Image (cartoon, grey):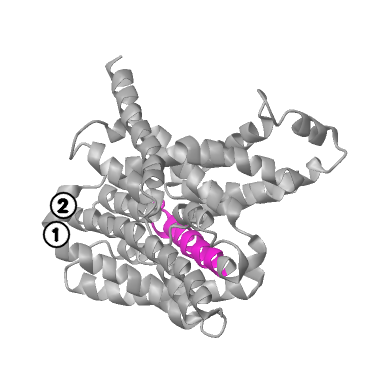
């Protein structure tokens, strides 16, 4: 009973933060920051190192499901055709350049004794928090048009490719088992995608889904949750492959949904952004080791600078000729924004004993700062454009 009470008390504190965050942004319209920033900050305040109003362990299962929804929605938002076009090719090249830079720089840090977990830290420098960014970009009208396509392609490359690398090099002890697990996820995704042919118009199953997608049945949302939990359950034992499973679930769902897309998207927004996703971000704020971050501020700034330079700067070069300078700078800011995968990489490094505790804390702290600073800068830069246009009008 005490555990249930702790869980309810923690959930109450998290729900209060989740409810107050959009209210505060509405009351203070001049406070032009992403809602995620307030959720993370609120988690720090109610967490065990500040007011101790909530326990991260008590809500960890819900936070894991929230993380799954983050990647499910990121996979769903991704237009898979981008990777057969210029947007996808340039995004892939930019990530490869980031990986090469990360291996070189982190190799020097490892040689100097500042870094012990070479692979996790290097991969952390190449990640992009697309799942975190999608709601921010959508709220500010940045997903449409040419810039939106390049942002989505860049973000997906910075999320999917590190996930694949993590699954192979860090997911399990045997690399062949890791490759087999990835293959199993791909096969499962293909089978689920082929199942979409069963749902052709005029089919009895299609009619049932259409009839029962609203009111008390909510059959399409329930099958979406089933798909997500299925892929998470299949891949759970392979650590970060679970994130890959959620991302793949979103991509499969996009192929399934067909004409029911708008109705399902609204339901996913309600279930995800209305409940589970805020829990994950508040939980992430609660788990940050604030004392270790405060004890190593220089290390924090070094990691922050490296994230921006390694993941962001290639965008200024790779997108020359297709995006103007302002949009290239926005792409740089968006690409360098990281969080969920960095948190997971830090946990992996701590669990296998290869990452120094101070590096894990400051790495996550630097990722939090990217979420606090970079999307806000990209949004503000986006909002300056109408004013510039107005000034040129007679």
Residue 162: percent from the left, percent from the top? 44, 61
Residue 34 placed where, x, y %? Answer: 40, 53
Please identify the quarter of the rendering in which residue 334 is found. Answer: bottom left
Farthest residue in the left direction?
A: 295
How busy is the neighbourhood of tag 1: few (under 14 within 10 Å), some, or many (20 plus)? some
Q: Is residue 173 visible?
A: no
Cα distance between the residues tagged 1 and 2? 6 Å
The label shown at residue 296 is 1
Residue 317 x, y percent position in the rendering: 46, 83
Q: Which of the two residues, 297 or 142, is positioned nearer the viewer here?
A: 142
- The local secondary structure at tag 2 comes to helix
Which residues make up the magenta segment?
150-174
Q: Residues within 10 Å of mark 2 (few under 14, many from 20)?
A: some
- In front here: 235 or 339? 339
Element class at badge 1: loop
Left or right: 27 with respect to 387?
left
As drawn, 287 above or below 142 = above
Q: Say which quadrant the N terminus sits in.
A: top left
Task: Give me the residue at 43% from left, 50% from top.
Answer: 240
Marks 1 & 2, CB-CB < 8 Å contact:
yes
């Amino acid at each position: 009973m005490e555990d249930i009470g702790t869980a309810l008390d923690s959930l109450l504190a998290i729900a209060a933060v989740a409810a107050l965050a959009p209210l505060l942004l509405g009351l203070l319209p001049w406070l032009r920051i992403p809602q995620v920033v307030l959720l993370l900050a609120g988690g720090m305040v109610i967490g065990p190192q500040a007011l101790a109003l909530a326990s991260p362990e008590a809500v960890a299962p819900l936070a894991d499901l929230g993380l799954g929804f983050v990647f499910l929605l990121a996979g769903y938002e991704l237009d898979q055709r981008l990777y057969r076009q210029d947007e996808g090719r340039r995004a892939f090249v930019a990530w490869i350049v980031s990986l090469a830079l990360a291996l070189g720089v982190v190799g020097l840090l490892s040689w100097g004794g500042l870094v012990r977990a070479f692979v996790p830290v290097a991969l952390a420098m190449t990640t992009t928090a697309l799942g975190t960014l999608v709601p921010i970009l959508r709220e500010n009208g940045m997903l449409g048009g040419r810039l939106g396509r390049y942002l989505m392609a860049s973000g997906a490359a910075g999320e999917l490719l590190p996930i694949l690398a993590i699954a192979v090099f860090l997911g399990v002890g045997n690399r062949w088992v890791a490759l087999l697990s990835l293959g199993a996820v791909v096969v499962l995704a293909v089978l689920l995608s082929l199942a979409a042919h069963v749902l052709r118009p005029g089919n009895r199953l299609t009619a049932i889904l259409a009839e029962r997608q609203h009111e008390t049945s909510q059959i399409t949302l329930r099958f979406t949750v089933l798909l997500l939990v299925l892929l998470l359950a299949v891949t759970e034992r392979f650590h970060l492959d679970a994130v890959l499973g959620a991302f793949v679930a979103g991509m499969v769902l996009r192929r399934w949904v067909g004409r029911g897309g708008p109705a399902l998207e609204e339901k996913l927004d309600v279930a995800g952004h209305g409940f589970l996703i805020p829990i994950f971000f508040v939980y992430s704020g609660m788990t940050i080791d604030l004392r270790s971050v405060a004890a190593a501020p220089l290390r924090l700034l070094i990691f922050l600078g490296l994230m921006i330079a390694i993941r962001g700067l290639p965008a200024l070069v790779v997108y020359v000729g297709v995006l103007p300078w302002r949009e290239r700078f926005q792409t740089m800011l968006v690409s360098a924004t990281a969080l969920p995968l960095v948190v997971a990489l830090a946990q992996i490094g701590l669990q296998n004993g290869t990452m120094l505790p101070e590096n894990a804390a400051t790495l996550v702290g630097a990722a939090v700062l990217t979420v606090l600073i970079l999307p806000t800068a990209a949004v503000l830069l986006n909002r300056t454009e109408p004013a510039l246009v107005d000034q040129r009008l007679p």
